Each structure stands twice: as structure tokens, then as C-alpha cells.
């Protein structure tokens, strides 16, 4: 079976939510930050007091690498102000208050892909505000506009969901199979790729079987079962596992003729094309030992964490950490007032027991971090150089190639915050190079 | 309002800890310790207790004087145990105590403690005793003898008296030698545990032992006057060194190619010293020498990074 080199096998904890069907929830107040994607923040088109309809564009893209924001519920704009943001700090957000009953009905029509032009598709995706839903939230229309000198031959649909606990992509593959495949076909057409792969880790046999069944007559699209191993779902890892190609250091998948998209993104694309529906909701997993009811939810963007946690029966006494995303790369939250954004793949409520870590000890050079680094870096040496502030040496050790997957910190017996130190080193170098150019 | 913990990811961790790894080495040494007590009786017990006791005490005192935190991990016990196991059973306890203090203070703490030392602490202590008390360090007794009837080790017998020792005795351990090195069987049981628990990497022991086997085989083929490769594998401190000292993570290379170089280099040194040098045994020197070039190997060996083409 195809797999990545090195990496780790954390306990996957998916059984806790994988049988929960996707359920809709209906908040009456949403907080929509203008920064929900990689790139420049969007610009508001509404004022306080305006009435808005679900799906209406309320902020427009400010540049090519940017994305519009749409009202995720119908109602009235009650404020445009700085609000706590799940990626940290505070950010300008549009707050809408509405009523539970008023929900739009988005209908998906049958649309023949061959009747659509590439420009039409790219425009629809851009207008719909679709960004990568795997977590990085990179505007999808940019990814689907490869430069003419970089021909794309392969599209990989990423259904690995290699972060423990998360099951949203799994449920989408089971419940929205048609849209996953339709979205993949749209992407293939747009970038001119001849072949498509749907990559699924082998801890999801039901999804593998179901999609294989649906693709029986398909010649150009193949399901690729992959060995369950973290971080299998990282773009660079997927490309290596499936195609045995390496994305050059500092480059992008399109440098090796590949575009990788998440299954959630494919579903959003399908809905934008077939139903003219903008990206106003997404599937998230709510899990962890600190929450009463585990669930996979279809939530309007902007829904506050507090509302979702109430819907899931509330926090348990032992709840200690609230994480947006998975336990390996997710971001801890200090308040439940933060909203779900386009890049929110899950909300985890972890207990002391689940997130236990012993005190930091000196490095004993056991080399577990090297043996598990999927990129082949030397994390303990990088971390040591960062601690000693030897910035100029870091680049020799290829620090900028770090995926920040966290395998090194996970395996370290001395519990040294390796990936945190490495991120700090990267940040320092980025700032230093910015200062040099300006 | 409920307060949540804020931290940088990841939020889950493997259960490995330094204490667990060091504790694992202690568990893996149980068969070796048992064999040493079986063969050398009370001498083994007092020697082990002395070395471990002095190791713990000197680490404690040193850190107290420097006003540093006393670590909770048991690496000082490991150092004490390993030192006891590489000393002659008949060594006076005061000399063993001196060696243990040297191991901890000069071998480990003076560099900054666990993780920072360049040389294997137990072997540093042994090298110190070898230099200061060469007679005590080369006086050997037979197993099951309670009065010191001095004898030579199988390696010494082979080197200086051209006498061979039955291989089965070497394998089981009823021969003279350092406290814990005589029984290959006991060492292999402990090594098996270390491998199963993944506490050690197989590269160095494999490279080390096969180099000794092949190179001593070459000597043996050209001149059967030299000992056979099997004899080389089973005699002296090679097994103990290969599985318990050349695998010490702190003093061996990080990068895998470096571990191969370490093992092969140490193997070559052992055979050269044993067959051509003035000493009958060379395991200690081979490991200490390779320890000394480990920082260089870590610094200059290339490692392959994804997407980087040279």
C-alpha cells in the first residue's frame, strides 16, 4: 500500500464521531470576519442596519489572492466591529442577527460539465468565495488558474483526513459522494488535467468501497487507498505517496503538474456550479473527551463556538483546551465567542488526560524527531539553533521546508516544543527577509 | 467564566519519556545483573551497590552545590550499573567508588549533565581507572571462586598464551572477565527487550558486530593463529558494548548514515587493538574514540531533505 516516509501513528479517535450523520444547525447570530482566507482581507459592502439575505455578498475580494464573504443567514447587520478571531487576536467582523425559520432553499440542478467554459467555472468559484476547506483556506480560484507555462496533468482529491478525531471529510465522502466526484471533474476540466485521484486513508474502508463503486465505469479517476499515517494528507506528502514525485523546495504542487484539493472544497465547488450557492456553510466535527455529544455538523459560517457547544450538550467539567482544527495542528482558543470560519475543520474539547505532557527535559539525542520527520529535516538541531538564536545557520538546515506538522514534538521523549521553536525560527527569518527588501 | 489552556500545537503527545527509556535500559540489564550475581556472587552485589550508590550521591551533591534541580530521570542509576558491569569483579570497592564519581562528575556533569556529554560516562570512568590503577583493572578471577585466584580473561589467554576457551562457556558466561560482560546469552536477552521496546536503534550494533566478525574473519583466514570470528564476537566486552554502550543515544550519531559509520569504525578499532595492539581488549577504546568524532558526524554528514536537490 502507498504511504509516506516516516511520519507517526497517533491514536486516531475517529470512532467517536464517524457514525454521526451530518446534522444542520440554525444559529440566529453569526460573526463573519473579513479575514477567513490566506491573502488580503475582504472589504465590507454593507453598513450597520442593512438587511441581508442568506447568500448575499457582504464583503468583496480586495485583490486576486482574496475572497468575498457572503451572509450565511438572513437578517440584519447589527455591527461591524473587531471581534476575537479563531486564528488569534481580533479582527474586523460583520455581525448578522436573524431568525431561525428564515432559511434559503439551495437547489442543485443537473449541469453538464462540458457545457461550461473554463472562465465561467473560475468566475463562479471566485464569486462563491470558495477557499481550501482542508484548513489552509487558500482561495480556490487562484489554485485553479495555473500559469500557462505550468501544465497540470493530475488532480488529487484529498480525502485522507489524517488529523485524529476529525470525521467531517469522511461523512462528506459517504453522504455527498456525487458532489465529491462532480467537484473533482470540475477541477480537472478547469486545470486541464487528464487524470484524477481520490486519496483516502485505509482507516475509512466504507468510503473507499463506496467511491470505488461509483467510479466503476470511470477510466480517468482512480481511488487510491493510502496507509493511515500522519501527516499523509499534507499536499507534499500526498504527491509523494501517489506519484513518487517531490515538490521542489520553495515550490508549489503545480511545479510538478499537480493540483491538490480537499473533498470539502470539491463539494463546495459542486454546489456553486450546480446550485449557484456561495460558500456560506461547512461541515465540522465536534469531538474530544471534554464535550458531551460528539457530532458532525453543517454549520453556517460565523456561528459562534459557544452556540455549537450548547448544541452538543455543553462542556464537561474536565474540559481544558478548546482547539479549532485537529489535535496535531489546531489552534487553542481562549474564548468561545470566536466564530467558525472557512478554514474550521473541527472543534475539539480536550481534557487534561488527553493532552497530558510531562515537563521538558534535555535532549538525549535519541533522534526520534529525525526518524519521524516526514520532510527529512533535523528538528532537534533546528530547535537548538533557534534557542541559541543562530539565525544564519537555520537556512542551511532547510528550516523553511518544515511543514509544521508537529510529528517531532509528538514523538519527543524530552517533550521539547520542537515545532514551536522551529515556527519561531521561520517567523524570524521571514521578518528578517521582509526588512531586507523594504 | 471557564478558563481554557492556551498552547502551541500539537496537543497530543506520545507516551515516551526520558525516564521510561532510562528505566527500560535498567530493565534490560536485569538478565546481565542476574548472571553477574550468579557467577560472581556477593562480589557482584557489593560492586553494583557501590557504583550505583556513589553515582547517585555524586550527581546529587554536584547539582546541590551548583544549585540546580535534581533530575527525576534515572540516568545516574544506568551509569552506575554500566560502570559496575565493566569492572573486574575483584576490584576494591574504594576504586570502584572513585570510578563511579569520575563517571558522573567528569563523564557527564561537567559537560552540563544528561544530553550534553560527549563520551559515554560509564566508559569514561572505566578509562580513568584503567589509567590510574592498571593492575587492579587487569586482575581477573574465575567465576564461582570466592578467594581471588587470579587468572587471565579468554582474550588474554588467546592473545598471550595461545589458549582457546570453549565457545559454549563464552556464550553462557562461566569465564573470567568484567562483571557483566561474560554471558553473551544474558546480554542478548536484554538486547532483545531493548529492540522490542524500540529503545535502541539496530544500526550501530549490527554494523559494529558484523565489522568485527568480517574483519577478524579476514585475519583468521590469512593466519589461523588469530582467534576465530565467533570467538571475537563472544569474548570480552564486545556484546555488552555493542548493545548497551554503542547504543547510548547521547554519545552516538543522530543521522542514520552516521550510525553506520560509528559501528563500522568501532568494529575496525576493536579488531586492530585485539589482534595487533598491546592490549588484549579494545571495546572501550573503540567506543570512546567513535564518541569523540560523533559531533563531527552530526555536523557534516548530509541528510536528504524532501524536495531539495543538491
Image (tube, rainbow, N blue to C red):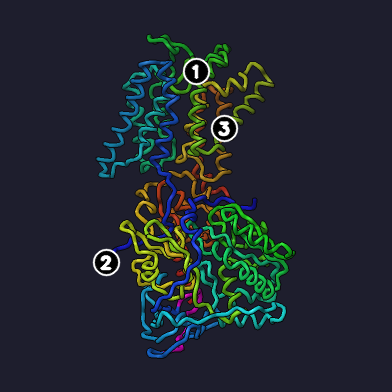
Residue at 50 percent of width and 85 percent of height: A57
Q: Say which element carries label 2.
A: loop
Of all chains, the one bearing label 2 is: B
Front-lying residue, A201 or B78: A201
Q: Which residue has dot 1 on it?
A: B173
Label 3 – label 2 distance at C-alpha = 61 Å
Q: Nearer the viewer, mark 3 or mark 1?
A: 1
The reply to whether residue B285 is in sight is no
What quarter of the picture does the N terminus of chain B occupy? bottom left
Establish whether labels 3 and 1 are both on one chain: yes
Sequence-earlier tag: 1 or 2: 2
From what the image shows, is residue A83 above or below residue A246?
A: below
Quarter of the image with the C terminus of chain B is: bottom right
Q: Distance between the residues labelled 3 and 1?
A: 21 Å
Q: Nearer the viewer, residue B99 or A366?
A: A366
Measured as percent of width and height from the top left, residue B154 is found at 52, 16
Amino acid at each position: 500500500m502507498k504511504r509516506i516516509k516516516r511520519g507517526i501513528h497517533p491514536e486516531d479517535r475517529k470512532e467517536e464521531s464517524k457514525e454521526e450523520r451530518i446534522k444542520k444547525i440554525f444559529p440566529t447570530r453569526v460573526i463573519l470576519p473579513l479575514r477567513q482566507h490566506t491573502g488580503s482581507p475582504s472589504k465590507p459592502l454593507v453598513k450597520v442596519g442593512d438587511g441581508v439575505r442568506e447568500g448575499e455578498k457582504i464583503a468583496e475580494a480586495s485583490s486576486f489572492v482574496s475572497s468575498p464573504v457572503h451572509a450565511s443567514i438572513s437578517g440584519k447587520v447589527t455591527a461591524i466591529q473587531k471581534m476575537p478571531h479563531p486564528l488569534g487576536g481580533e479582527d474586523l467582523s460583520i455581525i448578522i442577527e436573524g431568525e431561525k425559520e428564515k432559511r434559503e432553499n439551495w437547489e442543485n440542478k443537473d449541469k453538464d460539465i462540458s457545457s461550461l467554459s473554463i472562465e465561467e467555472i473560475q468566475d463562479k468559484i471566485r464569486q462563491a468565495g470558495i477557499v481550501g476547506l482542508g484548513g489552509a483556506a487558500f482561495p480556490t480560484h487562484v489554485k485553479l488558474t495555473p500559469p500557462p507555462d505550468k501544465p497540470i496533468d493530475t488532480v488529487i482529491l484529498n480525502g485522507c483526513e489524517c488529523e485524529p478525531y476529525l470525521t467531517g471529510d469522511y461523512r462528506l465522502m459517504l453522504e455527498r459522494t456525487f458532489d465529491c466526484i462532480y467537484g473533482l471533474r470540475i477541477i480537472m476540466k478547469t486545470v486541464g488535467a487528464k487524470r484524477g485521484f481520490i486519496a483516502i486513508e485505509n482507516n475509512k474502508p466504507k468510503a473507499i468501497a463506496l467511491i470505488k463503486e461509483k467510479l466503476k465505469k470511470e477510466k480517468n479517476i482512480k481511488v487510491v487507498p493510502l496507509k493511515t499515517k500522519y501527516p499523509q494528507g499534507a499536499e507534499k506528502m500526498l504527491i509523494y505517496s501517489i506519484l513518487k514525485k517531490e515538490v521542489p523546495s520553495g515550490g508549489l504542487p503545480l511545479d510538478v503538474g499537480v493540483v491538490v484539493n480537499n473533498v470539502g472544497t470539491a463539494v463546495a465547488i459542486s454546489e456553486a456550479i450546480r446550485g449557484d450557492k456561495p460558500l456560506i456553510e461547512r461541515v465540522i466535527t465536534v469531538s474530544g473527551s471534554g464535550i458531551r455529544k460528539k457530532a458532525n455538523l453543517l454549520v453556517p459560517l460565523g456561528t459562534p463556538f459557544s452556540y455549537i457547544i450548547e448544541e452538543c450538550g455543553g462542556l464537561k467539567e474536565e474540559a481544558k483546551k478548546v482547539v479549532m482544527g485537529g489535535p496535531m495542528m489546531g489552534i487553542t482558543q481562549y474564548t468561545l465567542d470566536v466564530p467558525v470560519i472557512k478554514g474550521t475543520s473541527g472543534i475539539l474539547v480536550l481534557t487534561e488526560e488527553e493532552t497530558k505532557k510531562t515537563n521538558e527535559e534535555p535532549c538525549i539525542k535519541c533522534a526520534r524527531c529525525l526518524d519521524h520527520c516526514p520532510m527529512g529535516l533535523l528538528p532537534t538541531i533546528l530547535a537548538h539553533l533557534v534557542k541559541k538564536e543562530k539565525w544564519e545557520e537555520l537556512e542551511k538546515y532547510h528550516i523553511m521546508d518544515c511543514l509544521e506538522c508537529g510529528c517531532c514534538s509528538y514523538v519527543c521523549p524530552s517533550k521539547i516544543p520542537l515545532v514551536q521553536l522551529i515556527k519561531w525560527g521561520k517567523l524570524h527569518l521571514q521578518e528578517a527577509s521582509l526588512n531586507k527588501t523594504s | 467564566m471557564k478558563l481554557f489552556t492556551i498552547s502551541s500545537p500539537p496537543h497530543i503527545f506520545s507516551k515516551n519519556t526520558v525516564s521510561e527509556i532510562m528505566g527500560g535500559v535498567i530493565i534490560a540489564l536485569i538478565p546481565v545483573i542476574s548472571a553477574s550475581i550468579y557467577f560472581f556472587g556477593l562480589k557482584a552485589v557489593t560492586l553494583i551497590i557501590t557504583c550505583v550508590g556513589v553515582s547517585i550521591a555524586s550527581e546529587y551533591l554536584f547539582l546541590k552545590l551548583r544549585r540546580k534541580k535534581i533530575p527525576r530521570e534515572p540516568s545516574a542509576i544506568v551509569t552506575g550499573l554500566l560502570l559496575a558491569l565493566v569492572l573486574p569483579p575483584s576490584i576494591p570497592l574504594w576504586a570502584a567508588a572513585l570510578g563511579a564519581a569520575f563517571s558522573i562528575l567528569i563523564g557527564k556533569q561537567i559537560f552540563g549533565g544528561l544530553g550534553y556529554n560527549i563520551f559515554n560516562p560509564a566508559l569514561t570512568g572505566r578509562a580513568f581507572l584503567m589509567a590510574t590503577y592498571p593492575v587492579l583493572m587487569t586482575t581477573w578471577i574465575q567465576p564461582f571462586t570466592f578467594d581471588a585466584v587470579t587468572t587471565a580473561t579468554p582474550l588474554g589467554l588467546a592473545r598471550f598464551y595461545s589458549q582457546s576457551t570453549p565457545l559454549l562457556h563464552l556464550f553462557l558466561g562461566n569465564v573470567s572477565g568484567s562483571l557483566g560482560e561474560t554471558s553473551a546469552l544474558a546480554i542478548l536477552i536484554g538486547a532483545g527487550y531493548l529492540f522490542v521496546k524500540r529503545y535502541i536503534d539496530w544500526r550501530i550494533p549490527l554494523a559494529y558486530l558484523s565489522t568485527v566478525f568480517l574483519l577478524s574473519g579476514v585475519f583468521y583466514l590469512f593466519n589461523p593463529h588469530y582467534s576465530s570470528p565467533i570467538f571475537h564476537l563472544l569474548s570480552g566486552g564486545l556484546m555488552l558494548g555493542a548493545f548497551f554502550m554503542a547504543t547510548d543515544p547521547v554519545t552516538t550519531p543522530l543521522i542514520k548514515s552516521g550510525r553506520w559509520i560509528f559501528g563500522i569504525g568501532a568494529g575496525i578499532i576493536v579488531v586492530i587493538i585485539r589482534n595487533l595492539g598491546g592490549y588484549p581488549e579494545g571495546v572501550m577504546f573503540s567506543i570512546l574514540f567513535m564518541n569523540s568524532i560523533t559531533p563531527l558526524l552530526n555536523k557534516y554528514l548530509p541528510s536528504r531533505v524532501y524536495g531539495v536537490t543538491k
